[in-house]
Image (cartoon, rainbow, N blue to C red):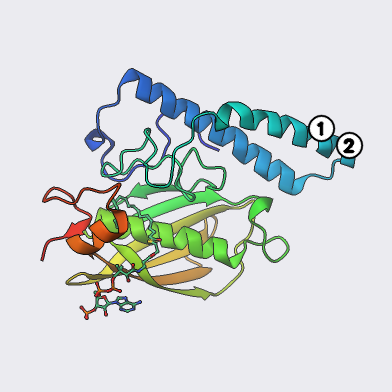
Amino acid sequence: MTDSGRSYHTIGDPAEVEAETESLRDRRAAITELGDALRTLVEQAAATEAPADELRRAAALVREATIPVGKQQRERGQMPTADDLLGGVRMYNPVCGSGSALAPPLLIELGAGGVTGSCTLGLAYEGPPMYAHGGVSALLLDQILGYATSASGHPGMTVRLDTEYRAPVPLQTELRLSAEVVNVDGRKVTARATIATAAEPDRELVVATGLFIALRADQAIRLFGTVLHPDASNPAVAHD
Ligand SMILES: CCCCC/C=C\C/C=C\C/C=C\C/C=C\CCCC(=O)SCCNC(=O)CCNC(=O)[C@H](O)C(C)(C)COP(=O)(O)OP(=O)(O)OC[C@H]1O[C@@H](n2cnc3c(N)ncnc32)[C@H](O)[C@@H]1OP(=O)(O)O
């Protein structure tokens, strides 16, 4: 679980992220607080052995909670007002976002040779008994690969993700991820990422290679026209 405050998903130097007004800081802290509560709910709901009447009582309470949350909803073409897309603040990113009930969340740090990530997966992520679902491993790896490519100055979209599952990923165990860019060929960027446990960081449980393509301006406009304004200062768009 994350603390409230500055624990949401950012990329790069936090000092570079747009100056937060007091009200934006407060709203992001509240989004994180709700995210923490939702993650606790999701995890406990996946692990519960409570009797049927208790589950029905909980369902009624959750339905009640949707009333204030549902009052003001954004549409698909609108970014969350608490996000800063180019600054890399994505409050609801389903892997790292502190506001997302789906996110473990994965905490990513920028290091000298690449990026590292840490998280612990609860029972909500179970695939084979006691171990993570393979799709969840791929989700974590795609995210950290994307982060590594962006952090290296070559943001792009995943067009290929090759995932090799060498050993099952244990739940309720602190995990370490790492990723680095291994090749840049024009708009094509290749990166490699791994998942291990914190206790045995050199034993690679899952290894992925991702191919990322930097978007041409016309592609960015076609895909993200309503939310992304490509210009010379936008690092997400290749200008070749
Ligand atoms: C990306 C902008 C978003 C804004 C980002 C802003 C700031 C960044 C901040 C934070 C980011 C931090 C972390 C990132 C987070 C998460 C990472 C998750 C990433 C994803 O989860 S993202 C969703 C899944 N992703 C897709 O939804 C892509 C679907 N896709 C397409 O929309 C098209 O594919 C497109 C438009 C990408 C390319 O357009 P296209 O396909 O027409 O390709 P194009 O002509 O441009 O080709 C150029 C060269 O790539 C080769 N090439 C293409 N595809 C290939 C393949 N599959 N295998 C081998 N080579 C391939 C060609 O062969 C050619 O090679 P060559 O030059 O040698 O001929």
Please, what is the three-letter code of the amino acid marked with disc 2?
A: Asp
For the residue pair 180 and 136, the one nearer the viewer reads as: 136
33 is higher (above) or lower (below) than 179 = above
182 is higher (above) or lower (below) than 74 = below
Q: Which residue is drawn at the image coordinates 57% and 43% (left, top)?
A: 101
Q: CA distance from mark 2 to mark 1?
A: 6 Å
Q: Which residue is drawn at the image coordinates 41% and 57% (left, top)?
A: 143
Residue 240, percent from left and from top: 10, 66
Q: Viewed as shown, does residue 94 lie left or right of 38?
A: left
Please, what is the three-letter code of the amino acid marked with disc 1?
A: Arg
Residue 219, percent from left and from top: 24, 63
- Residue where numbered disc 2 is placed: 53
Q: Which mark is residue 76?
A: none
Ligand 1 within 8 Å of disc 2? The answer is no
Q: Viewed as shown, does residue 225 lie left or right of 194?
A: left
Disc 2 element: helix
Residue 22 is at least partly visible in this image:
yes
- Residue where numbered disc 1 is placed: 57
Residue 155 is at least partly visible in this image:
no
Callout 2–callout 1 Cβ contact below 8 Å: yes
